[in-house]
Amino acid sequence: MIPLPIILLAAGQSRRMGGKDKLLQAVDRMPLLRRSLETALQAGPTIVALPPKPHPRYDVIKGLDAQMVEIPDAVEGMNASLRGAMRHVPPEATAVMVLLADLPDITPGDLKAVIDTVQHHPDNLVWRGATANGKPGHPVVFHRSLFDDLARLTGDEGAQAVVRAHADRVCLVPLPDQNALLDLDTPEDWDAWHQKRNA
């Protein structure tokens, strides 16, 4: 079976971090972006969407065996990253996983659980991680029949329009706790997360 490619979205601007880059904040004694990429690489070949060079995000993932894709129009929002990364998905791929880079609790086991569900429930078009109590989150896997729709998206909504259009063919995969949903967008989010983790 062909490994399922993973798109790691890491070209955002951290607008709510007061001048700091959230993807460079430390998680497990390494920048969050490097941790997220190492996590993705344990589940499959990974394409990383990154801001235009020069940018410090390139430095923190140096040496990792991933395909780096520069997104020249990253300021447009998340869908510029999706469009740019989709151009690098292998033509033989039967599906693609889309993963946000700012999920500090996601694990390789979480990603593999979603991939396993794709294999065991092949009649769906979208498979997505959910919280332990069933709230939809990330990662999200899209069947190859939706690739053209992903490649045409614009703006900053992400692929929610594609998911909504196929709501009857979405399979939720419960992951532990809030792993599928917890992202850290502000300094206050980071402080609260560190306090909870160190409690």
Image (cartoon, rainbow, N blue to C red):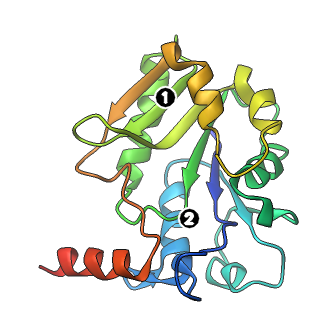
Is 72 situated above or below 113? below
State the image coordinates of residue 136 (x, y, percent, origin top left). Answer: 39, 37
State the image coordinates of residue 95 (x, y, percent, origin top left). Answer: 65, 30
Mark earlier in primary sequence (1, 2): 2
Is 105 situated above or below 18? above
**Residue tagged 2:** 37
- The type of residue carrying mark 2 is Leu
Task: Report helix, strand or loop for mark 2.
Answer: helix
Is 52 situated above or below 144? below
Residue at x 58%, y 18% (from the top left corner): 166
Instruction: Please tell me how crowded label 1 is: few (under 14), some (14-19), or many (20+) other residues with Cα within 10 Å.
Output: many
Residue at x 54%, y 86% (from the top left corner): 18
Residue at x 24%, y 47% (from the top left corner): 176
- Counting every numbered tag in the picture gives 2
**Residue tagged 1:** 127
Q: Is residue 27 visible?
A: yes
Instruction: Please tell me how crowded label 2 is: few (under 14), some (14-19), or many (20+) other residues with Cα within 10 Å.
Output: many
Task: Report helix, strand or loop for mark 1.
Answer: strand
104 sits left or right of 90 in the view: left
Along the line of sight, the residue nearer the viewer: 37 or 126:
126
- The type of residue carrying mark 1 is Trp
Q: Mark on residue 108?
A: none
Image quadrant containing the N terminus: top right
61 sits left or right of 153 in the view: left
State the image coordinates of residue 193 (x, y, percent, origin top left). Answer: 28, 74
